Every structure is written in structure tokens, then in C-alpha cells.
Image: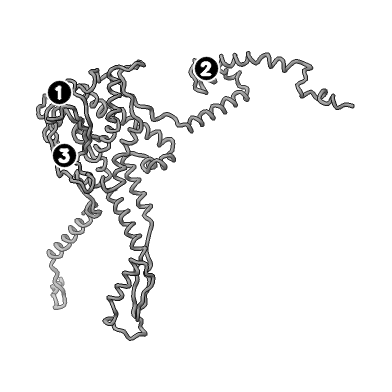
Amino acid sequence: MATMKKATKTKDTPVVNQALLLGAVRTLTDLTRQLSSKRRDLDVECDYTVDPTKEDFDEMYRTCGVAKRVVHILPEESWFTSPEVYETEESKSTPFETAWNDLANRLDIFSMMERADGLSGIGRFGIIFLGFRDSKNIKTEPSKKNNPLMYIRTFDESVVTVKETETDVTNERFGKPTIYEIDFAEKEAPSGKSQVVSKKLEVHWSRVIHIADNRRMSDVYGESRLKPVFNYLEDVRKILGGSAEMFWQGAFPGISFELDPRIDLDVDQIDNTGLQTQMQNYANGLQRWMYTQGLTAKSLAPNISSPTEHLECQLKAIALTLGVPYRVFLGTEEAKLASGQDAAAWAKRLMKRQQKYITPYIIRPLIERLVKYGALPEIDVVNLNIEWPSLLSPSEKDETEVAKGKTEAMKSYVQGGVDDLLPPKFFLMYIMKMTEEEADKAMEELETHQEEHADELEDDSEPGKDDGTNPDNSMDGDEG
């Protein structure tokens, strides 16, 4: 049996370390897996504010007009009409109704509640401060007898701090504020006048109506209306600011200066100071010429694009997040073009907000507090009627279109002669949507009208009567 010779390594045969090669492959595989699975931090990449504070909300509200629209669109639309507050349906006003109407007119209470509703959406909450006559010691509860309301103030979260809360779990106000700290200083004092730096006072909860929209698990802190769209608002500011800068730079695209190769001139021989002066006069003044020796001036082509599509994309994202029809969000003129379905859905949402938020969380607590401390006559606030006008009422144009349609339907019914198939009363009730009482009244009026004109119809139908249409008699006077 032949034996095989053992292979021998020559000097040119490379020696491979299997363990080292396997380790390198594993390291490369792990690195590839880590790089492919690593997610980008969009907040960092887009320079977004990750967790905006109340100062950030206040700054955005004051500096961005779109942010103001976000904050105030729901309150403004909800308070477009004021509700009617009454104790009974009798025509004669009760003492409470008289006192409430006088107070509402004197202090413009509905307007103040609308303002507070708007301010509460900048941060997590807002308040209405009730200035009773005994407001010398506002850290204590007001007296409960004959304590008129002298004034009302509204504040947002930027100047209000909850200092103390109720810790007794058996108390009905458990977890709610007991003491507020309010900065009463006028932050927007007229220029040139002395301004108080700070005037912080502690206030008892009974002198405050706490308003918090978009609440989840807390009855004290809601969610700012700006928070869900804060990053979109930052993008809006980038687009608007960037487009303005783009136009400003593009309006004066710039000029490049090139040495004329036919002229023997060194760069050091160029009068840079004089050239700079001419450029400043040209760019910032009315001088439309420049004198350049040995240089050729060439205008750089501008590169300007419209920001409309990018801005519209952000505004639509904001409107979608807020649940507001886009045309309604843009304003009055655009809202007129909104479809009927959008308008109806928007009206239903506003009515829901009026009845399930404004009434139970703003209006009723305010009246209850005024009754409790003697600013209004004592009544049962639970049974008080607060009625909002319907936002689904048709406009004059809608009423005109409906009337036109009904008229056309009645005309077709009469001319079609289908009264044997569908009697007039049933037509009025089921097609014209009248009540049975309205249909009976319409039929009575029709019968009365026919009876009154029956004699005229009989006279017109008498044989031989000349009504000016008889061809035999029309030319008698011309026969000769």
C-alpha cells in the first residue's frame, strides 16, 4: 500500500490564524447589526424642544401668531354667542335673574370668562380671580354675607403657582389647590413708566375659579393646547424665518469680482477699501454704479423657492392634530368655503364643548361661588338653566335654498296631478315635513281660499260673457 507524503509548507504559503479570522468576522457582524438597528433621534436631528416648559409655551404664544390661533380658536368659536342664564321660564324676572344680568353687564362677565378660557390653554391651567369687597386679606376665605363682587382678573399659568394642596383624603377637595401664589404685577406696562418687578400674593382657593382644559387623570393640571403641535409651530417659525432670509439674500444675490487677465495687476494692488465702500453704497444706498479698475463684476444668480407648500403642510398637520377643519383654522374668509359636512361637524364639536366643559367647569362654578359668598341671591345652582343658542341653525342662504326647494316640490306635485296617489295632507306631512297640526291648518286655508274665489270662477265660466278673448265678437266694431 502506497503511502502519501505529508504536505510541507513553503516559504510562499501564508499562515492563517483561524481564531483571529473568526473573531474579526464576528466583530464586523456585531458592528453592522448595531449600526443598522440604531434609530435616529428626530428631536435632536430637527432641533425640537423635547419637553417644553410653561416658559416655552408663554414664549411661543407671545412670538408666534399661529400659536395664538391654536390657543384661541376653540374659546373664540365656543363663545361666539353667549348663553342665557335663567332660573325659571316665566316672563317675569326673578331676583336672581335681575341681579345676575346687572352683574354680567357691569363686569362684562361673559367676556372675562372667554378670556380666561383662552389663557388657560397657553399652559396647563388658568384662573379667574374674584375681587370681593372684603379682599383686604385674600389669603383667607371671604365672608358669606353681603359680599359684592367688585372686579374680576384673569391669569395664565406663567404668573400662577399652586403653593399648597389638600392632603386630607376624606376631604372633597383632596388633591386640589388650597393656596395659590399669584403675581399681580403688570408685565405689559406702558413703556416709559415705572413697572413693578414682582407683586406675588398668596390667595385662598375660594377666591379663584380654576380652569384646566384637556384634562386626563388630574383635575388640577390639563395639557397645554400648544403641546401636541409645539414641534409643528417650531417648524412654522423655521419656514417663515428661512423664507424671509432667503428672499432677503436673493433680492441682492451678490457680486463676484474677477481679475481681467489682459491687465497685469496683482491682487495686492486692488483698492479693497475703496471697493468695499462702493459695495456698501450700492447695496445699502441709492447708488446704482460701481467703478472697478482691472476687475470684472458679475452678478450671481439668485435661488429662491416658494415656501407655500411647506407652510401649508405644517398648517394642515396642526389643524389635523387639533381636530379643526383646515379652512376654519385659517380664518373667517376661508371658513365660508368650508363644506357643509365640515361645518356641521365643527358646530357639533363646539356645542359639545359648550355643554360638557364650559357650562359645568366655568360658568356653573363661578355662579355657585358668587351665590355662596353673597354676591348673588341664594338659589339652587344645580337646577339653574344655562342654555346655549344652537350652532346648527341654518343661515339665511340655507333657508332661501330650502324654501326654493319646497316651492319646486309643491309645484311639481300640483302639476303632476298625483293627488289621487298621495293625498295633499300626506304630501304636506311626509314630503314637506309639516306636523299634522300644520298640515291641517294649511288645508283649511286652502279650502277657505277656494271658497272665496268660487264666485269669481263661476262668473268667468258663464256662456256668452265677453272676456275679450271671443274671436266672434272681437272684430264687431270694425265691420263696415
Q: Are marks 1 and 2 in contact (CB under 8 Å)?
A: no
Tag of residue 143: 1
The residue located at (25%, 20%) in the rendering is 382
The residue located at (84%, 25%) in the rendering is 477
Residue occupying the far front of the picture: 193
Give the mark toward the camera: 1 or 2: 1
The residue located at (11%, 26%) in the rendering is 169
Question: What's the distance in space between the residues labelled 1 and 2, CA to CA?
Answer: 60 Å
Disc 3 designates what residue? 183
Q: Position of residue 405 (x, y in %)?
A: 54, 29
Q: Quadrant of residue 190?
A: top left
Residue type at mark 3?
Answer: Asp
Question: What's the distance in space between the residues labelled 3 and 2, CA to CA?
Answer: 65 Å
Q: Is residue 337 left or right of residue 102?
A: right
- In this rendering, does residue 215 appear at all? no
Q: Earlier in the sequence, mark 1 or mark 3?
A: 1
Is 396 or 225 nearer to us in this picture? 396
Q: Secondary structure at mark 3?
A: strand
Q: Quadrant of residue 28?
A: bottom left
Q: Are marks 1 and 3 in contact (CB under 8 Å)?
A: no
Residue type at mark 2?
Answer: Ala
Question: Label 3: how many residues lie within 10 Å, few (<14), some (14-19) or many (20+)?
Answer: some
Disc 2 designates what residue? 439
Q: Is residue 237 left or right of residue 339?
A: left
Residue type at mark 1?
Answer: Ser
The residue located at (79%, 23%) in the rendering is 470
Q: Secondary structure at mark 2?
A: helix
Q: Position of residue 391 (x, y in %)?
A: 39, 30
Q: Is residue 201 left or right of residue 360?
A: left
Q: Position of residue 385 (x, y in %)?
A: 31, 21
Q: Earlier in the sequence, mark 1 or mark 2?
A: 1
